[in-house]
């Protein structure tokens, strides 16, 4: 009789422990899911801004290799910003709209098989928005492209202007690299250096090749 009471007491104390463990595991899974969902959008924004930063700065450095005029460099950077933002927006819109069409077709097939309205309502909430994705992509690209444009806008001295653009882009590359690493849960220093070296290489190659072609008289 005593042994039966002891086992019952053990069972009573064991159940709450398992419930607590299950609840904590469920909370961890929920937090990871929410974080990953939010981090995907933020990482995409950081990558878009980095793309705008590197491409616009490389264009401006390429033109600056053969033309010392401030107006030419600013107009080139502005054209790169507009063209790049439009390209990113259109590409993102087409890509996300294709994903939306696929998911809608899959939902239609599921309704034909199961005819479950509750499932349809839950899936509609998680469908991608092509217009929102396009606007976010264009905005992120424009934010990155504004960095070299603003850095060069008010400096007329040629060599000083190039130096300021490189310094501003270097700082922005380090910030974007660090943000991408934090959102992707990667080593911050290594990721920042990788992004920084990549941006430097893009600007140096564009500057060098444009200088070579410009000096050859082509």
Image: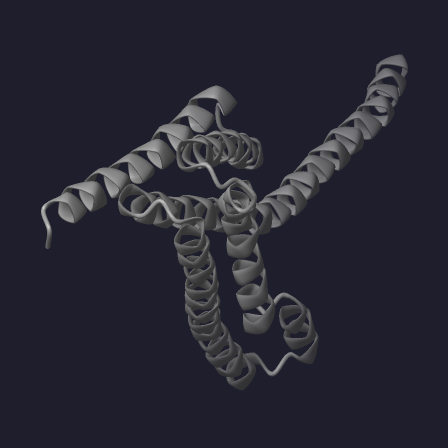
Colouring convention used in this rendered image of the protein: one colour
Residue at the (58%, 59%) spot, across then down: 139
Left or right relative to 54: residue 32: right
Residue at the (42%, 68%) spot, across then down: 95
- Between 166 and 119, the residue placed more toward the observer is 166
Looking at the image, the residue that sits furthest to the bottom is: 112
Q: Position of residue 78 (x, y in %)?
A: 47, 59
- Between 134 and 51, the residue placed more toward the observer is 51
Q: Is residue 11 above or below residue 127?
A: above
Q: Is residue 131 above or below residue 161?
A: below
The quarter of the displayed image where residue 22 is located: top right
Left or right relative to 175: residue 31: right
Looking at the image, the residue that sits furthest to the top is: 2
- Between 70 and 112, the residue placed more toward the observer is 70
Left or right relative to 45: residue 81: left
Left or right relative to 197: residue 127: right
Q: Position of residue 213 (x, y in %)?
A: 14, 47
Q: Position of residue 116 (x, y in %)?
A: 64, 79
Task: State which quarter of the image contains the C terminus.
Answer: bottom left
Q: Position of residue 58 (x, y in %)?
A: 35, 45
Residue at the (53%, 35%) spot, across then down: 172
């Amino acid at each position: 009789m005593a042994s039966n009471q002891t086992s019952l007491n053990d069972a009573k104390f064991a159940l709450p422990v398992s419930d607590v463990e299950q609840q904590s595991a469920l909370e961890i899974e929920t937090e990871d899911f929410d974080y990953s969902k939010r981090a995907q959008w933020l990482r995409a924004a950081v990558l878009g801004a980095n793309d705008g930063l590197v491409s616009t700065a490389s264009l401006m450095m390429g033109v600056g290799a053969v033309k010392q005029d401030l107006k030419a460099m600013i107009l080139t950077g502005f054209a790169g910003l507009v063209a790049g933002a439009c390209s990113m927006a259109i590409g993102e819109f087409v890509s996300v709209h294709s994903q939306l069409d696929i998911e809608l077709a899959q939902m239609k097939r599921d309704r034909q098989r199961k005819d479950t309205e509750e499932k349809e309502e839950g899936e509609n909430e998680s469908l991608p928005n092509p217009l929102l994705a396009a606007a976010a992509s264009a905005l992120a690209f424009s934010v990155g492209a504004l960095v070299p444009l603003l850095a060069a806008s008010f400096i007329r001295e040629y060599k000083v202007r190039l130096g300021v653009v490189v310094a501003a882009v270097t700082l922005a590359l380090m910030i974007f690299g660090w943000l991408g690493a934090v959102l992707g849960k990667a080593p911050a220093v290594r990721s920042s250096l990788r992004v920084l070296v990549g941006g430097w290489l893009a600007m140096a190659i564009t500057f060098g090749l444009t200088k070579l072609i410009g000096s050859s008289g082509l």
